[in-house]
Image (cartoon, rainbow, N blue to C red):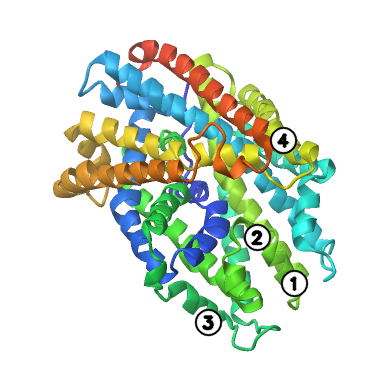
Amino acid sequence: MKREHWGSKLGLILAMAGNAIGLGNFWRFPYQAAKNGGGAFMVPYFTALIFMGIPLLIIEWAQGRYGGRYGFGTIGPMVYLQAEQGSSKKFARFLGAFAGALALSVVVLLNSYYNHVIGWTLGYAWLTATGNYMDPSVDTAGYFVSYIQNPYTVFIFWIITLALLFYITRGGIQKGLERLAKIAMPMIYIFAIILLIRTLTLGSPVKPDWTPIKGLDFLWQPRWNELSWSATLAAAGQIFFTLSLGMGIIQNYASYLNEKDDITTSAVATASLNEFAEVILAGTIVIPIAFTFLGTDGLKSGVGLSFIALPNVFRTMTGGSIFGTFWFLLLFFAGITSSIAMFNYLVAFLEEQFNVKRKTGSLLIFILYILGGLPVALEPILTKTAELFYLTELDNWVGSYLLVVLGLVEVLAAVWLFGNKGLEEINKGSYWKVPKWFYNIVMRFITPVFIIVLLVFSTITYAKDGYLKLIPDFAKNYPNLIPWIFAARLVLIFVFIISFIVVFRSLKDVDEKKTNSWEN
């Protein structure tokens, strides 16, 4: 099957940046930074970016282009092809199947709830524009609960989101993903800059000294007493989440590169666009807005910042309906550009393993996500509570933990087992060459050590917080919701086992399928 390629360098970089720029930038980063030491949080954040994030990002780009050379766009065959250079075929096949199963589990299950959150942002954009919750007497926390318990609002905007993903993906790389990136990415930056300008001109109706500049001081002034191991782990975990590492989707996008495309420069460019959106734009929009109207408590309102705290702000500020709509549209476009990468990964898997045509594969994945996302939608509707235990349990493992495990496997295959060929692959066609010392010291040792430390201490934290127990500590006061946790675990185990079997069997044919030249 002839593989597509990106139509332009700009389209590639925008698509890769869109893949990285998602809800984690504008929703997750601000409250993580605010509650974990402000400026002090940024020290481990940038340290992890330099020594773990960017090196692993370059590794994933190189791994993807290498797999694409032989006609593969999913991570299982990629890991196998590199691992067999430094190990037995039997071990390489196991490692490839393990990596492939992890990636499939992540993209199937993470998107099963991530698409719902994107649907919420679209729904709230509509509700903000139409003024549904603008009455100050409305409790925004109760309004959000009623929203996720309303089958009409939940299903309508969720299905619209899935339909858009289906339509875009069926168009292919150039007419689908690249076209989306060229439209959505400028819109993200336009909405963000409009919001940034409005943010810096705000005055607080609550306290005169709650100014946007004081909000920026709160973010950037180091509060060293709040910096801890948990904050350091949160910073490293944010790097994984924000750059979309450990999912296989960067490799998938990179598999559509040409043989001599510059991956080092492109990887650094996409990382820079992502960090500009996260640190400069998101940090300058969300933190000052929340501080100006809500003070320090508003900054630390966690996941409710976007859907509960900020709606309180929008209905208070002048032009709040307009700027609130821009905010939720910003989140929607950011979410879509990330989600489409996971959608496309699964379509590519069907193309490669089962010779399913792209349009048919897109429809099958559309149906898969409807089935996979039903439990996320139905839990609050059926239980009449705001506790999303099914979503929480999946996110604890799929959205936070398995990413790190897969990242470690990638380094093992692409650097340790592939050996010096890994450096050759990275530097092929690159204007900026990765020095041999950087490859041997940082990529081979420091980066995996960062990942191992993150993995070990995350496991210890999970154990302390009771996540490893049969019944997690956070669920003990909700016995009627415990079955939803068990359901999430069973779904995760089932998806991983099926994925491992399918990928393991498919790797028998990798040597027969691979070719020694690029298909043009």
| Left or right: 280 in relation to 448 | right
Give the Cα distance between marks 1 and 3.
21 Å
Which is more N-terminal, label 4 or label 1?
1
Which label sits in the foreground, 1 or 2? 2
- Mark 3 and 4 residues: CB-CB less than 8 Å, in contact? no
Q: Amino acid at mark 4?
A: Asn
Which residue is at 71% across, 71% downward? 313
Closest to the camera, between mark 4 and mark 2, is 4
Location of residue 259 by image quarter? top left
Could you say where residue 219 lies in the image, as x and y percent from the top left? Answer: 48, 72
Q: Secondary structure at mark 3?
A: helix
Work out how far the residue at label 1 is from the one at label 2, CA to CA, in angstroms.
Answer: 14 Å
Residue 181 appears in the figure = yes
Which residue is label 4 attached to? 480
Residue placed under numbered mark 3 in the picture? 214
Q: Nearer the viewer, mark 1 or mark 3?
A: 3
Mark in front: 1 vs 4: 4
**Residue type pointed to by label 3:** Lys
Q: Are marks 1 and 4 in contact (CB under 8 Å)?
A: no
Q: Nearer the viewer, residue 318 or 168?
A: 318
**Amino acid bearing label 1:** Gly
Left or right of 269? Residue 349 is right
Q: Residues within 10 Å of mark 3 (few under 14, many from 20)?
A: some
- Secondary structure under the numbered disc 4 in the rendered image: helix
Residue shown at 48% from the left, 15% from the top: 502
Residue beneath disc 1: 320
Q: Tell me residue 118's x, y (percent).
A: 66, 47
Reading the image, the residue beneath label 2 is 306
Q: Earlier in the sequence, mark 3 or mark 2?
A: 3
Dot placed on the residue nearer the N-terminal end, 4 or 2: 2
